[in-house]
Image (cartoon, grey):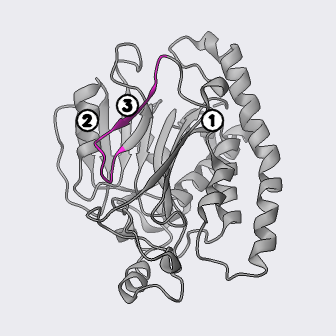
Amino acid sequence: MTGSMAQQRHSCTTLRLLPVTAAVFTVVLLYNTTFSRQEAPTNKIFFQSGNSSSRRGNSYVVAAAANISRFKQQLLAGMVPYFARQNTSLPGYGLEEEDWQLFKPIISCPSNRPLTKYAGEEDGSKFLCQVDRPGQLRRDCIIYSLGSNGDFKFEQEMLSRTSCKVHTLDCTYNGTSQGQRHAYHKWCLASAATAAQRGPPFYSWSQVTQKLGHNRVDILKIDVDGYEYEIVGDWGLEYAAAADGRENAASSLVLPHELAMEVHMMIKPKPSARPWLKTWLAKLPKDIPHTLPGMGLFFLSLAELGYGVYMMEINGGAPECCSEVSLLRVTGSP
């Protein structure tokens, strides 16, 4: 990756500070936190999943695609007030809670897969469309988990609730497999350019799917403390290559069907931040977008790849830090 991949580990939780120092990251959940969760209203649920390929053309998918298109068309207009605000305030301190509303859910889970929280209530839990009932996933489903830092609650719950094979990728921790259907790979996901420059254990997304022999990934969980931007950015490059038919990209590109990730925003602490926070933030990657326009590009790229947000849980203690986001890929080819 662009910075030291030693930072690619399990994502942080947040700590409530005084209002004047609300721009925070933290690494524990021993303090009080508040969360604001958003789901798409039930009367705007448009996506229907299943094994039948004919459902791609049904009204659910058509309407979901329309919602994603509408999101892309309206995003800039929603961001214009932010540009004016930046003229009178210091940039670079992350999002306010209302800013996250620009990326609120625009679709929701299929009716046969209601929204469900997995892996407990603490840091590391993820919202997914329900996966543990018969017929909700293929029997030979594949799940990737990026970033672990030795915490395998998500992997263990997926192993116990589904028939999926689960693969954990983290080159910063000496992990071991958690069962017969689980494999631990001491790899870190990087852009194709970084992987070519640095070599193993850094691999691009396509290199990973090819090495593991997967032509479909059902679920991807991402907890990599800000490197989600490089991962999604590289998908855009690969998708463009696939669309152009270059270098056999079309036959090798495998994008995950469902995403659950913590999206990070705030990196630079406010001048009034406590010294320990400034020290800790200084260790994080410096190439994460610092402003709302950067976050807008991130979600716009996901929408261009066919992903729609169906759940967002804003970190109420420090909304400028991060937010849990879950998405389904409802349009796009390959």
Image quarter (top left, top right, bottom left or bottom right) of the C terminus: top right
Pick whichever, 135 or 127, lies toward us.
Answer: 127
**Three-letter amino acid code of the residue under disc 2:** Glu
Which disc, if any, is residue 250? 1
Q: CA distance from mark 3 to mark 1?
A: 20 Å
Check disc 2 and report its element: helix, strand or loop.
helix
Pointer 1 local density, CA inside 10 Å: few below 14, some 14–19, many at least 20: some
Q: Are marks 2 and 3 in contact (CB under 8 Å)?
A: no
Could you tell me how far apart the alpha carbons at marks 2 and 3 are, in whole angstroms? 14 Å
Q: What amino acid type should be assigned to the residue bearing mark 1? A: Ala
Q: Position of residue 118 (x, y in %)?
A: 33, 37
State the extent of the magenta-drawn residues as a range.
112-125
Where does residue 6 sit, x and y in percent of width and height? 34, 70
Please give the residue where the numbered disc 2 appears in the rendered image: 157
Tell me the SS state at disc 3.
strand
Q: Nearer the viewer, mark 3 or mark 1?
A: 3
Provide the residue designation for mark 3.
Answer: 142
